[in-house]
Amino acid sequence: MHTHSLLYFCLKFRAVNLIIDQGNTATKIALFRAEELQNVDIFPQWDATTVARYLDRRPVEAAIFSTVTEPDAGALSVLRQRVPRFVQFDHTSRIPVRIDYHTPHTLGLDRIAAVVGASMQCPGRPVLVVDAGTCVTYDLLTADGAFVGGNIAPGVRLRLLAMHEHTGKLPLVDDSGDMPEIGFSTETALRMGAILGVVYEIEGYIARLGEVYPDLFVFLTGGDALKLAAKIKSRIFVDENLVLTGLNRILQENAKI
């Protein structure tokens, strides 16, 4: 076999890593070859049957599972039985950043993974990771690789739900639809109050932390990243798969890939 053909063969059949990120409303399942993201699927429900069918179609060499909710015992059992190297990500797992959070055992695993993903792309720079999902998290990584902490605020849909549930007459509106700068109806006023509230909040964090860390790099990720990015004026980098990238790096760290 020629050298180029052999190289192609090795690259094509490199070990495939399975990354499972279970959030509050959906589960993302991704495939990586080394550091290269191959595919992402989103499942509203994730259980033993789902993961077994997935593995039937896509055999993998290693897998990592991370969740912000209670894990499905049956799904975990399938992964342990069928994946040669399986890692259940928790607070005892090895990670390539230093955690300076005062209560590390309470720190969301998705927040840790996002910071790890950011550290891979911006080594030696301070980084703010904004993860806009059910909640919006703001996490700061210093230039020397220390995760010093961050803040948590309600996401767009939580704000819309809170305004509906804690008032007498305000309706529950969807986060998609007309998006004027100034609302021209109750529906648009609620929608843009929630969306621009998050946008201006993000802009405020960027401005304040940019004064302290002039070389600050900002990542925006999460399910609402694209919706919010269209309204944000500050310089940001949108990476919807930052958590998955971080989990793949953590898998490599713990499974010795």
Image (spheres, rainbow, N blue to C red):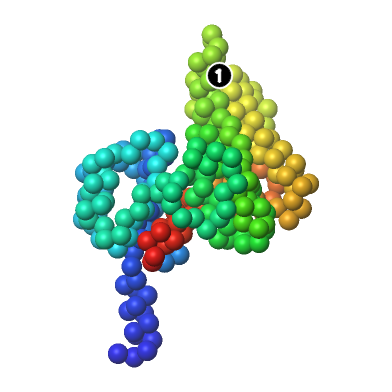
What residue is drawn where x is 41% and y is 59%? 254
Of residue 106 and residue 211, the one placed in the foreground of this image is: 106
Residue 42 percent location from the top left of the image: 37, 45
Find the residue positioned furthest to the top: 168
Of residue 62 and residue 162, the one placed in the foreground of this image is: 62
Look at the image and tell me in which quarter the C terminus lies: bottom left
Look at the image and tell me in which quarter the N terminus lies: bottom left
Of residue 241 and residue 122, the one placed in the foreground of this image is: 122
Q: Is residue 129 above or below residue 257?
A: above
Q: Is residue 55 above or below residue 229?
A: below
Q: Is residue 156 above or below residue 245?
A: above
What residue is drawn where x is 40% and y is 49%? 89
Q: Is residue 123 above or below residue 48?
A: below
Q: Amino acid at mark 1?
A: Met
Find the residue positioned furthest to the right: 211
What residue is drawn where x is 23% and y is 46%? 77
Q: Residue under circle 1?
A: 163
Q: Is residue 75 visible?
A: yes
Q: Is residue 222 visible?
A: no
User: For the residue carrying disc 1, how many other residues have a C-alpha within 10 Å: few (<14), some (14-19), or many (20+)?
Assistant: some
227 left or right of 216 in image: left
Of residue 24 and residue 69, the one placed in the foreground of this image is: 69
Quadrant of the image occupied by residue 205:
top right
**Which element carries disc 1, helix, strand or loop?**
helix
Find the residue positioned furthest to the bottom: 2
148 left or right of 38 in image: right
Residue 95 percent location from the top left of the image: 49, 55
Residue 98 percent location from the top left of the image: 57, 53
Tell how many labels. 1
Residue 237 percent location from the top left of the image: 61, 53
What residue is drawn where x is 58% and y is 34%? 152
